[in-house]
Image (cartoon, rainbow, N blue to C red):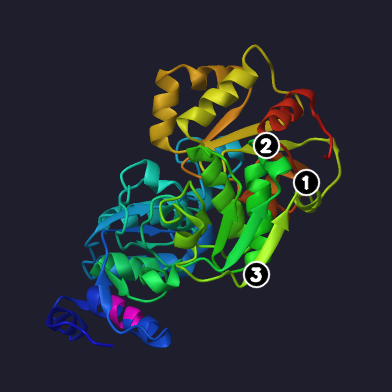
Amino acid sequence: MHLTDEEQRILNGEHGEPQRLSLQVLVKLGEAYGAERMVEIRSAHLVGSSYQIAGEAGIAIYTQLVEQGARVKVRTTSDPGSIDFTRWRQFRTPAEYAERQILIAELLDRMGVIPTWTCTPYTIFNVPRFGEDLGWSESSAVVFANSVMGARTNRLAAYVDLCAALVGRVPRFGLHLPEHRRGEVLFELDPALSASFEDHHFPVLGYLVGQVTGDRIPVIVGIREATFDQLKAFGAAAAASGSVALYHMVGITPEARTLDEAFGGRPPVERIFVGKREIARTLEQMSSGNGGTVDVVGVGCPHASVDQMRRYASLLYGKRVHAGVELWVCTNTVVEEMARKMGYVETIERAGAKLMVGTCHNDCPLGAWGFRRLVTDSGKFAYYTPTTVGSECVFASTEACIAAAITGQVERR
């Protein structure tokens, strides 16, 4: 790789051991992928902020870096932790586990990381602009930044993201290069499906797209309109069931004003037709369990927006969560505060639901609950639940999720 004079000085150790080690890691990564040079980034986002991901090895690395004086060089935000920092006892988190997560928070704080504790950093403090280069991890955040905002980032691994933050650079390969952002697989929606496309279809379509595409770049034609939250749900599901880091939705996302633009003037390597039958088949695959008695309902994955909090409050107004059911709503601290001021939190909590703030169902130690059946409206959570929670999962619309929390029963669609 060609390094600038400044980068060579970093590699020589003139800026301290944390930067030297970080750049060394990034150079090795760049060489492995054939990168010719580094590119400066505007921000970073860290997935290793969770104790479940970082573990004791992460604590050891962070401690060493802090002792060596490490400080991030660009705006850097944290992914959800493994606990709700103010409510962890409500969720039966072991005290020793909470203490380790709190230690990680302290170490990241000493390195200058902004404690957002969210998988949606693009909603608070870390909003990328079109064409900016980033050093992000967190699959749902990466796919949103690339696809919806037109920024440029590869899907970095834990620790590599911190290396990028400490030197403000990443190797220039993959999705940092315009020629690698062209669409490859075309998904054509049946006009009959397009005309009846509903909110819960977005994560289902995302799940299907991820399964078929893998790590290729999909282009979707036939979606007439999509909200911020629908695009968020679509991308999160596609990134979970596959390894999608960028998608183009013709007429909706910024690099796909036309079909020709989405493919960079080249023909697709594969065409996939998506009709009601394909959606129904995918919907069936997203549930790992049957209907019946519900133990827990989880919404807010990725973290809920203010609009989603309004929706939950509307569905729960004047209702009560079933005595034998847990209803957990995940969000970040900024949305929680806004929703509280607007009265949504009061309505949600009065109904018997619990807020999980700054964390996620996927990252918390839930073994103490002994859950057997979980219901969610999240394609990402549905994909990971059998392994992270160890329970059956039923995917349902948001309305059906809230109804299941109230009645204690769910039907598999």
For the residue pair 323 and 235, the one nearer the viewer reads as 235
Image quadrant assignment for residue 348:
top right
**Crowding near pointer 2: few (<14 within 10 Å), some, many (20+)?**
few
Specify whether residue 139 is painted magenta: no
Q: Residue at x 36, y 82 (%)?
A: 30
Image location (x, y in percent) of residue 298? 65, 38
Neighbour class for label 1 at 10 Å: few (<14), some, many (≥20)? some
SS at circle 3: strand
The stretch in magenta equals 22-26
Task: Name the residue tied to disc 2.
Answer: 195
Element under label 1? helix
Query: Hey, what amino acid is under mark 2?
Result: Ala
Mark nearest the camera among 1 and 2 is 2
Image: 248 above or below 61: above
For residue 276, the mark is: 1
Residue where numbered disc 3 is placed: 270
Main secondary structure along the magenta-highlighted residues = helix
Q: Which callout, 2 or 3, points at the residue further toward the start of the chain?
A: 2
Q: Is residue 378 visible?
A: no
For residue 214, what is the image quadrant?
Answer: bottom right
Work out which quarter of the rendered image holds the N terminus and state it: bottom left
192 left or right, relative to 112? right
Q: Is residue 196 above or below residue 117?
A: above
Image coordinates of residue 37 in percent, x first then y, are 27, 81
